[in-house]
Amino acid sequence: MNKKKIKKILKALMVIYTIAAFVLWGVVNVDLKVLFDHSPNMFWIHLPSTAQVGEMNEMVIEVWDEFERISANYKGQIDFNLISYNLTNYQIISATSVVSNIPTSYIFTKVNLGIERFSFSISTQGIHYILATNTLTGKTFWSNPILVDYNPVKLIWGDAHSHSIFCDGGGLPRELYNYARYVACLDFCSVTSHGEFLHLNGGFNALEQATNRANVPGKFITFPGVEWTSGTAPHVPLIGWGHFVCIFSGTKLAHISSSIQKNPSELWAELDRFTSEFGCRAIALPHHTVSKKYIQDWPVCFDYSQYVRLGEVFSVHGSSLVNPYSAWNVTGEIDQPSYQISGCSINEALMMGLRLGLNANGDSHDGFPGHSLSHTRAFIGHQYPPTYILSRVSHLYPSGLTGAFVSAITRESIFDALYNRRVLANSDFGRPYVTFKINDVEVGEDDSTVFVANSTSLRELELFIAQDGTPPAAYLQAAQPWNGNPIWNAKVQIFKNGYLWKEELIDAPVIQLLFYDNETIAGASYNNCIEKEGEFYINEKSHTPVNPSSLNTNGVDYYFIRILCSRGRVTAIGPLWVESLT
Amino acid sequence: MSVKLFRENLSWKNTRFGILFLSISSIVFILAFMFVFAGLSNFLYLLRVAIIPVVVLQILMIVISLALSFSLSFLLSEWILEKKNPFKDDKLSVKHHVFFSILMVITILDVSLFYVNIVAIICATVIFWLGKTRVWRILGFLAISCCLVTQLTIYLLIWR
């Protein structure tokens, strides 16, 4: 072979080699269906969860494609309808007896870009659902429930944990807040970038400014927030105590990062200093506590109940409510350990005596707080907003939402609800209306504690559920329209002292359940400590020695509720603690 | 003398060059800084130290971005204003070597990023095809190999 020929072959190989790199990149990073297919698949109908009788409110209709993105392609007529349920017997109220002012029909054109807002009011007390029928396909879509009554307490929804391009997420904070307010229809939100990145790129002030600019009292509330990421952030020591999202009630954002506060003691000391200097409050939120890489070291929280008020039970990582190896695990968590590690779930933390309310957030890294898309094929890299770290690839669950019972849409009132645990958690964008009471004390009332005369006093557990009619999303499953009416079959589970106590199947959208308990109040304790070098730890991953005899609820019982709806939607509310006065 | 030098340097040609140079270099700096920050953040998952050299890392990011922006801007400004193809001659100047070195650094830093690692592949391709010397050709080959291996690893281990 002559030199020229060899040169030609070499050049051809160089071309093939270069093209191979680009082709392989394309295989990994481009999904043509996601890129080109925006055809409409379903309607998402959003109503506020509560309204006063006769009050004007806003309904939002979004047309979604099969990846839960807004489809701007929809053209067609929608007919509206109202289905109402009585608040005393939970039966359907006949349409003629309901006084309402809702639109009758609307013609969507391409001008709507797949989203439209309507004013409406309902003057009859009850739980109501607005139905929208696509006249072309005949398919009918249900909204979330709206409770109409004279009670001034509002149930509002938000996501207090999301990541922007300031760290390993996507989108600028102002874009995230816009999405949260106008597309995900949230009432509150916090963009909580990892402090370790903010420490490196000097992003604390920019995040604080974007957060304060997006805050509109009465409409949409934002909280300055940041995530302390021990063990698994870039350039921090490997020792991990878990991750804490810290949100603040004021306008200032603390400079928190595990490269500044190197251990939990320094974190608590900084929260003490910051809250006292700026006169604000802080909540530190443990999350994805059962994931192999982030196993939560609960003992570091024991003396800091003024900060550790809530546990994030659902997010794009899955559920941390119960141990993934317990008999009650239904949801799972990404990257769960290959063997059982006791004492990492929120349920086990409650058994140890921690008082955590159950909330859910997104922890979204794809730039979509309140309604993450990373559980669908739209996680793919070419989807706006861009992210530069692979985080969203492994987020296989939909983002969760926190419902908060508030008196007003202000920072103070919402923070107060979060602080006092007047919250419920939902595993996707759904907004069910759920309340849980024991002896008339609601979750979040009186520090969520019910006092009874003696240890065998009768406790009446009252649960009110109005399920969400929108199709759910779940693990690797985008929302798909119902075949006909929503499936209302659900399993209601009551957990007492860390164990499943009662279970009941329901098949109605609106229902009230009553349970009675007069078993002796005995409390719960955590008994799975291990011994390492003469000291006791809650598990082999823990770095904090404990006294095993102190890991209990001090004789106080606790109850929380989990509702397993069809197609993977899960709602949780509680706990309520029951304490005997004698 | 100084006035004369000033007048000579302030020619229309030099002014045009200066404006173009600064415009390109500032755009390139911002983009390069983003990619260097992204790559370095990702890379720093490997570096676990008790004392965090945050300032050193910030200086490193600025130096790498400045080196890329100045060298690339110089080559592009010459190409645009003087119609001088920067890669036509077989001989590479210092600015070429600086340019290729930084491209190599960016390739290594950015290769495992999500989606924007196309930048790493482009950098590797530039080194592979425009590095005239044997050393740069070999480094270019290694850079593209690195991209291929990383993409394959991501596909086989992490992708869903």
Image (spheres, grey):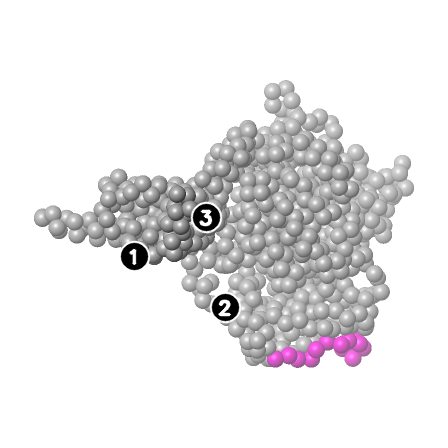
Q: What chain does badge 1 belong to?
A: B
At label 1, which amino acid type do we have?
Answer: Lys
Residue B104: image x %, image y %?
36, 42
Q: What chain does badge 2 belong to?
A: A
**Nearest to viewer (mark 1 / mark 2):** 1
1 and 3 marks on the same chain: yes
Q: Is residue A18 above or below residue A335?
A: below
For label 3, the SS is helix
Residue designated by label 1: B83
Residue designated by label 3: B29
Q: Residues within 10 Å of mark 3 (few under 14, many from 20)?
A: many
- Toward the viewer: A217 or A340? A217
- Toward the viewer: A267 or B74? B74
- Give the residue displayed 76% in from the left and 55% down from the top: A410
- Does A485 lie within the magenta span? no
Which quadrant would residue A569 be assigned to in this image? bottom right
Q: What chain does badge 3 belong to?
A: B
Which quadrant would residue A54 be assigned to in this image? bottom right
At label 2, which amino acid type do we have?
Answer: His
For label 2, the SS is loop
Residue designated by label 2: A38
The first of marks 1 and 3 along the sequence is: 3
**Nearest to viewer (mark 1 / mark 3):** 1
